Amino acid sequence: MKLTQISVFLENRKGRLYEVCSMLGKAGINIRALTIAETESFGVLRLIVDKPDEAIKLFHANNVTANRTDVVAVEIDDKPSGLADVLKILSEHNVNVEYMYGFMEKCSDKALMVFRFDEPERGAKILTAAGVNVVTRKNIQGL
Amino acid sequence: MIWNEKIETMPLRELKNLQSERLVKLAHYVYERCPVYRQKFDHLGIRPGDIKCIDDVVKLPFTTKMDMRDHYPFGLFSVPRTELAEIHVSSGTTGNPTLVGYTKDDIKLWGEVMARALCCAGAMPDDTIQIAYGYGLFTGGLGAHYGALEMGMTIIPTSSGQTKRQLKIMQDFQPRILACTPSYCLYMADDAREMGIDPRTASWKVGVFGAEPWSESMRGEIEQTWNMLATDIYGLSEIIGPGVSQECHHKVGLHLFSDVFYPEIIDPDTGKPVPEGQDGELVITTLTKQGIPLIRYRTRDIVSMTNQPCKCGRTSPRTSKIKGRTDDMIIVRGINVFPSQIEHVLLGIEGTHPHYQLVIDRQAHKLDEVEIMVEVDEKLFSDEIKKMHALEHKIKKEIEGVLSIGVTVKLVEPKTLARSEGKAKRVIDKRAL
C-alpha cells in the first residue's frame, strides 16, 4: 500500500533543479508528482516517479544524494472538505503528517494526495479501514 | 623605556654566557626531575654533563605538541602538582587538550617578560591599560595582566567581548594602552562609529596586538582607523603564553627575550639550523622555567630571525612576523584550530566520515568567520527538513563545544567540495593575512 518517494538533497543554486530533472528525462523516467521544501541554503526535492528503482540508481551514479521514503497516496473527493475529511480520520487516530502534497494527474474524478506519515504502514491501514482508497504503485505506473 | 635594561641591552657575549649557564642547569634539572626527559636524553645517549654551553643545545632532543598530549596531564612536568600556582589549558587536537602549569616563580617570570613586552610596545608605568584579551584558561588575558601588574600600570581587566561597554570604559577612563587581538580592535571601530565616537579621537595610543596572525596592511588599517601605534606580540602557552617576543616602535621584527627563551631556527624536515635570516621553524628552549620547562620545543611557526641589534638598544634577536605553519593549524580569533578536530566531531555524528571544508573569512572590520561545509551523503540525508536542520544544529553545537568559537555549518551536495589530486582540500583561508 505504500508508495516509494525519491527524496533528493539539493543545494540552493541556479540550475541545479534543472540538472536533476533533465537527468531523469534523459533516462526516460517520468515524474508523477513533486514538491520542494526549501531552506536558506538547501532544498529537499520529493518525487514520485514511474521507475523509482532506476531513479535511485541513476542518482547514485551521478553523485546526487537521494533516499527512498515510504509515503502513502490516497484518493480524495474533489469537493469542499474532501481533504479535511481525510485529515479528520488521521487526527482521530493520532497519525502525524510530516508533510503532504498533491498529484498533478488524477486516476479518476478524485484528487490524489501524497502523505508522509511518521508511521506510513499504520497510516495506510487506518485510511483503508475508514474506506479511503489508497493508491498502489501499479495505479501510479498506469497513469 | 626598556624594562630590564641590564638584560635587554646586554652585550651578546655576556648574554651567551648567561644562556650557557642556564642551559647547563636546565639539563640537570629536567634530567633529575622529569622521567620523560630522562628517557629522551638516555635514548640519544646524552648525559646532562655533556651540556657545557648554549651551543650544545643542538645535542638535546626536540619536544613536540605530541609529547605534551602523550604525557597529559602532568607527565612532562618537572615539579609535583602541589607546587603549581596556576594551570592553563588550550583545546586539544583530537583528544587531550594541552595543559601548561606555572609555579609561583614561573608566574613571576611571566610578569617579567610581559612587563618587558609592554614597555617594548611603548607602555609606561603611569599608563592605564585596557586588557581585552580573554581572561580564563586562555593565556592572553592573565599574561597581559601579570605584566601590567609588574610594571605598576593601572589595569582595566575588561576581558574580551561586550564591545559597547569596552568603548564606554575607554571613554570614561582614557586608557592609553590597549591589549587585544588585532581583528577585535578593527571590529570595535564599527561599534564606535555607531556610538558616535570618532575612532581617531580614542584614548588608545598604543596597541599590543597578538594571539592571531595579522599582516602589515592590517597594521596600516588599525593605525589609520584608531590613530594609534599598532605593535605585534608573540607567544604560545607551551612556552609561557604571551610575552615570548614583542615589537618596539621601530616595527622591525619582534624582540625575543632570549635570556629566558632560547630560540633556534631550523629546517622543519631535517631538524638542522638554517642560516641567519632564512625562513625556518622557530624552536624554543625555556631556560629558567620550573613547572614545565621545555627543551627545544617545536613551535611549528615559520619565521626568520636576525641577531643584528635594534636601533632601540635591545640586543636580543628579532624574529619576523609568523610567515606560516609547518602543520595544518590555523588561528581563528586567537584560538588554535586543527582540521582534525572537525574531523573528529563529524566522525562522532552518525559514525560517518563525510567530506568537509573549513572556510575562514574576515570581512573588513569584522571578526574571523568560520564556515564548515559538510557534504551530505545518504546516511546523513533525510527527506524531512526538520531533521536536516537538527543535523546542522548538532554539527554546529558539537564543533563549537570543541573549538570554543562560533561557527556556521552549511550542508552541501556530495563531490562539490574541491579536491586536489584526489586529496581533499580541508581548509580555505580567505583572510588577507
Image: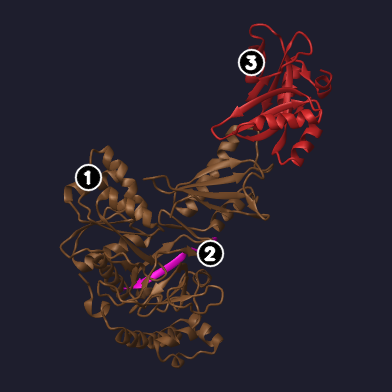
Chain colours: A red, B brown
Indicate the secondary structure of the residue bearing disc 2. Answer: loop
Are callouts 1 and 3 both on one chain? no
Q: Which residue is mark 3?
A: A88
Q: Which residue is mark 1?
A: B168
Residue B100 magenta? yes
Q: Secondary structure at mark 1?
A: helix
Name which residue type carries label 1: Lys
How many neighbours does mark 3 have within 10 angstroms: few (below 14), some (14-19), or many (20 or more)? Answer: few
**Which mark, by number, is residue B327?**
2
- In three-dimensional space, the C-alpha distance between marks 2 and 1, rounded to whole angstroms, equals 40 Å
Please tell me which residue is depicted at 62% across the width and 20% down the height of the picture: A91
Q: Which mark is residue B356?
A: none
Q: What amino acid type is highlighted by mark number 3?
A: Lys
> What residue is shown at x 43% (from left), y 47% (from top)?
B362
Mark 2 vs mark 1, foreground winner is 2
Pointer 3 chain: A
Image-based side of B62 in relation to A31, left or right? left
**Which one is nearer the viewer's eye here, B91 or A120?**
B91
Residue B344 magenta-drawn? no
User: Residue B400 in the image: x percent, y percent?
Assistant: 48, 49
Chain letter of disc 2 in the image: B
B299 relative to B21, above or below: above
Q: Position of residue B286 (x, y in %)?
A: 39, 77
Say which amino acid is labelled 2.
Answer: Asp
N-terminal-most mark, 2 or 1: 1
Spatial CA span between label 1 and label 3: 60 Å
What range is drawn magenta here?
Answer: B94-104
Task: Tell me if residue A142 can be seen.
Answer: yes
Label 1 environment density (alpha carbons within 10 Å; few <14, some 14–19, many ≥20): some
Image-based side of B67 in relation to B193, left or right: right
